[in-house]
């Protein structure tokens, strides 16, 4: 948490200092660092809109990592921040599976692909990692907006969904591989929906009622949605599954097929 | 929580002494009875095996662990599919408890799985049937407790969004809640569950076949299967029994879409506890099992042989795999079923007078058989046997059945060749009067030599054909010098 506080204060300082210099000498705003992609402002269509007015949600411009954070990246983080070693972290912040696939708390071992996404990482750990880089986790609407091309032709969208389903249906860890191996998507981002599930900062807002077949027949369900009757597109099975996955998670959960990448606000 | 405090205390004791159950399917569902301190023996119950009766005279506290595994398995010969399973197979493991049992239920989601899952047991009374309490991320487990209020045979299934896909991938099984009294004793209990499957490739198209969402939405399955794979209960894997034994089938239908018309060819069900409930109907031919429903079926097998189990919506049985087998061994009982006693030509209203056939037969014996008598007899036989395909005036039915009338094929082939075709049948392409045909002529070798001779003589002397005569001796010669195709009579 201390890292986060530091990052926030650094961010604030930057934010405060920027306008002054901008006034003095107008400049083109700096682009994202090489490992990130500038995602332009856009639109997200939630699977379960909270209200008809929110069938489309605006997403501000932001920066997103091109690829998920890898085991090698995360090892460097753990070396620099030993409090996040698996043998030192508190169980409230990372459950018993945290980094369990590594050979040792400070060593990947021969079984682990160094350039594959870091998995078995809790939400707390993912947040801490991003904060250490002066970044943050993307929120759900940012992640979905980057993954789904709303301008694609219906045929292309069908094909994309089929590809996502195919990934979801590949059993076990067979789809785990080094990041950035496949072509980038329409925005220049790699590996979305192709290698691992990814944390979003507001995963906990992706609530489905615990029984997904509820039709939202009372006010309490309004924020949970979930019945197919309320879905904007009940044939988007891939979106249902991402939502189901997010809503199944707790912040301390580590899972073998769950990784993350970081995001950052774009300078305004 | 509706549990009485005493039962709850017992549960807590059970929990504290248990520790974390290992995520393993080898042990199968695990049942303990802290009420009397006995460990209930619980045999792993992968279909078609049914665990033995609980044998308990009173309700107990029961602990069940069920593990979800996402696995690639064969769905047909040379075809694999990624199934999501309760316990590693389709259908999921058979669970057997007793009415009034307090069940501590553990759902384990294997760490290698990709999806979150939960379980809705139709035997559970309460919102979601357990689904609201069992939503479990990969590598985690959840627990809830329920009281088995009502006896019956119930379906359980996954209820995680998108629910139909989880069910279409095989996430269902049966839980049997025994009534408080013993069921009639039977010699065999079997577990059969129907389900429909949707693959991108056609039925039996080779390779790893992905799930086809559109076919699912259209309720147009590629496979309709008993116990999760084509031929799961066929051949060596058939259900087995001996003559005189009583059988109880626990039959479920996982769906997700189709309603089953469950039927065993050649059997009458003595009792069907329809819809898995308390009452039974007797003397049933076909029982409807809805998606998400079940039935208990009892019958005694009296006659040996192979009994084919089908969904009597028959295209599913013939073209989508909905076939299983029950093999019954033992002595025949000819008073119940004789086997084939007579196989003779039935002339029906199409036949002319059978007198002509009798006249020709009599004339053949005296050696005074004329061509005219042969033609008259052949005409009667042709009407009964041949006209169904070649039509009454030998005109055929293009493009399937070639004509015999004014046939260039008949004219250009040798007499021996023509006799051979009638005796032994013929399959494959031929050209008749300028038109291509490619179908099957069935062998008629079960007919007597003189019958075939009369038919051919009739054909040669009708409809613009060149005339001539075929004798019984000529047919006998071909019969002696050519082999019959497999399955044809001598």
Image (tube, coloured by chain):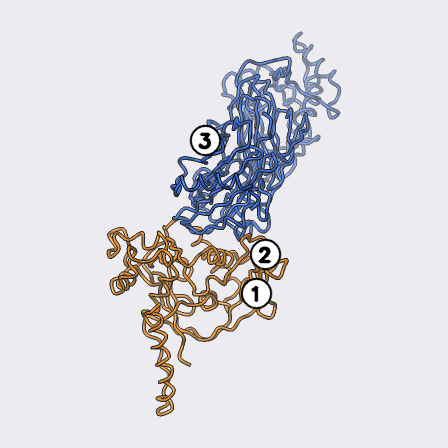
Crowding at dot 1, Cα within 10 Å, few <14 / some 14-19 / many 20+, comes out as many
> Same chain for marks 2 and 3?
no
Residue B413 is situated, as x and y percent measured from the top left of the image, at: 55, 28
- The x and y percentages for residue B163 are 54, 50
Task: Look at the numbered disc 3 and give the secondary structure of its residue.
Answer: loop
According to the rendering, which colour does chain B have? Answer: blue
Which mark is first along the chain, 1 or 2?
1
Q: Which residue is mark 2?
A: A228
Q: Nearer the viewer, residue B308 or A253?
A: A253
The answer for how far apart the CA atoms under marks 2 and 1 are is 12 Å
The chain under label 1 reads: A
Relative image position of residue B479 (x, y in whole percent): 54, 18
Q: Residue A51 appears in which quarter of the rendering?
A: bottom right
Numbered circle sitting on residue A115? none
Quick check: B476 above or below A203?
Answer: above
Name the mark on residue A49. 1
Q: Determine which of the numbered discs, if any, sits on residue B37 in the image.
A: 3
Disc 2 chain ID: A
Q: Nearer the viewer, residue A198 or B97?
A: B97
Asked if the residue at tag 3 contacts the one at tag 1, i.e. Cβ–Cβ closer than 8 Å, the answer is no
**Distance between mark 2 and mark 3 Cα atoms:** 46 Å
In the figure, the shade used to draw chain A is orange
């Amino acid at each position: 948490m201390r890292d986060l506080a530091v990052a926030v204060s650094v961010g604030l300082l930057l934010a405060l200092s920027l306008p002054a210099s901008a006034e003095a000498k107008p400049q083109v705003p700096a682009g994202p660092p090489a490992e990130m992609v500038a995602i332009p402002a856009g639109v997200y269509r939630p699977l379960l809109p909270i209200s008809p007015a929110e069938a489309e949600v605006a997403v501000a411009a932001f920066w997103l990592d091109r690829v998920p954070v890898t085991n090698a990246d995360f090892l460097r983080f753990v070396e620099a921040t030993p409090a996040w070693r698996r043998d030192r972290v508190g169980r409230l912040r990372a459950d018993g599976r945290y980094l369990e696939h590594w050979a040792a708390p400070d060593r990947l071992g021969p079984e682990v692909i160094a350039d594959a996404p870091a998995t078995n990482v809790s939400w707390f750990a993912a947040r801490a990692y991003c904060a250490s880089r002066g970044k943050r986790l993307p929120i759900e609407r940012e992640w979905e907006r980057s993954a789904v091309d709303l301008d694609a032709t219906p045929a292309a969208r069908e094909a994309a969904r089929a590809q996502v389903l195919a990934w979801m249906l590949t059993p076990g860890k067979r789809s785990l591989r080094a990041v950035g191996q496949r072509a980038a998507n329409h925005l220049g981002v790699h590996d979305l929906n192709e290698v691992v599930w990814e944390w979003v900062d507001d995963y906990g807002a992706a609530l489905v009622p615990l029984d997904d077949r509820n039709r939202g027949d009372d006010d309490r369900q309004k924020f949970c949605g979930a019945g197919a009757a309320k879905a904007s597109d009940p044939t988007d099975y891939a979106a249902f599954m991402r939502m189901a996955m997010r809503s199944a998670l707790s912040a301390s959960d580590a899972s073998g097929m769950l990784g993350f990448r970081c995001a950052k606000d774009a300078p305004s | 929580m509706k549990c009485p405090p005493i039962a709850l205390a017992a549960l807590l004791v059970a929990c504290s002494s248990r520790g974390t159950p290992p995520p393993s399917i080898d042990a199968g569902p695990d049942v303990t009875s802290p009420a009397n301190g006995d460990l209930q023996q619980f045999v792993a119950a992968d279909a078609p095996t049914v665990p033995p009766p609980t044998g308990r005279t009173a309700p107990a506290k029961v602990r069940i662990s069920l593990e979800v595994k996402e696995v690639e398995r064969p769905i047909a010969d040379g075809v694999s599919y990624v199934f999501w399973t309760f316990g590693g197979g389709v259908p999921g493991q058979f669970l057997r408890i007793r009415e009034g049992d307090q069940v501590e239920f553990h759902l384990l989601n294997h760490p290698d799985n990709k999806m979150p899952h939960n379980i809705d047991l139709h035997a559970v009374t309460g919102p979601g049937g357990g689904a609201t309490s069992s939503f479990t991320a990969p590598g985690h487990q959840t627990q809830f407790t329920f009281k088995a209020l009502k006896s019956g045979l119930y379906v359980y299934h996954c209820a995680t969004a998108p629910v139909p896909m989880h069910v279409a991938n095989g996430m269902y099984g049966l839980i049997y809640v025994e009534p408080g009294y013993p069921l009639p004793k039977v010699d065999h209990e079997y577990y059969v569950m129907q389900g429909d499957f949707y693959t991108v490739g056609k039925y039996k198209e080779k390779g790893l076949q992905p799930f086809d969402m559109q076919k699912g939405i259209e309720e147009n399955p590629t496979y309709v299967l008993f116990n999760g794979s084509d031929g799961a209960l066929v051949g060596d894997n058939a259900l087995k029994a001996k003559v005189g034994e009583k059988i109880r089938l626990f039959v479920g239908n996982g769906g997700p879409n189709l309603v089953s018309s469950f039927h065993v060819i050649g059997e009458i069900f003595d009792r069907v506890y329809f819809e898995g409930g308390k009452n039974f109907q007797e003397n049933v031919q076909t029982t409807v099992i809805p998606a998400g429903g079940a039935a208990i079926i009892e019958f005694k097998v009296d006659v040996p042989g192979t009994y084919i189990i089908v969904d009597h919506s028959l295209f599913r049985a013939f073209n989508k795999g909905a076939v299983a087998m029950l093999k019954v061994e033992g002595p025949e009982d000819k008073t119940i079923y004789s086997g084939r006693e007579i196989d003779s030509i039935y002339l029906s209203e199409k036949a002319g007078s059978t007198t002509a056939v009798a006249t020709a037969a009599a004339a053949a014996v005296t050696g005074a058989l004329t061509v005219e008598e042969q033609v008259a007899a052949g005409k009667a036989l042709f009407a009964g046997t041949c006209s169904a395909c070649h039509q009454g005036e030998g005109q055929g039915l293009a493009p399937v059945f070639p004509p015999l009338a004014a046939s260039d094929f008949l004219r250009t082939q040798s007499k021996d060749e023509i006799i051979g075709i009638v005796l032994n049948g013929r399959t494959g392409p031929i050209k008749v009067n300028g038109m291509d045909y490619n179908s099957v002529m069935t062998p008629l070798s079960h007919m007597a030599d003189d019958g075939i001779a009369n038919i051919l003589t009739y054909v040669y002397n009708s409809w613009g054909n060149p005339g001539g005569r075929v004798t019984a001796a000529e047919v006998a010669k071909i019969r002696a010098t050519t082999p019959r195709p497999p399955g044809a009579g001598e």
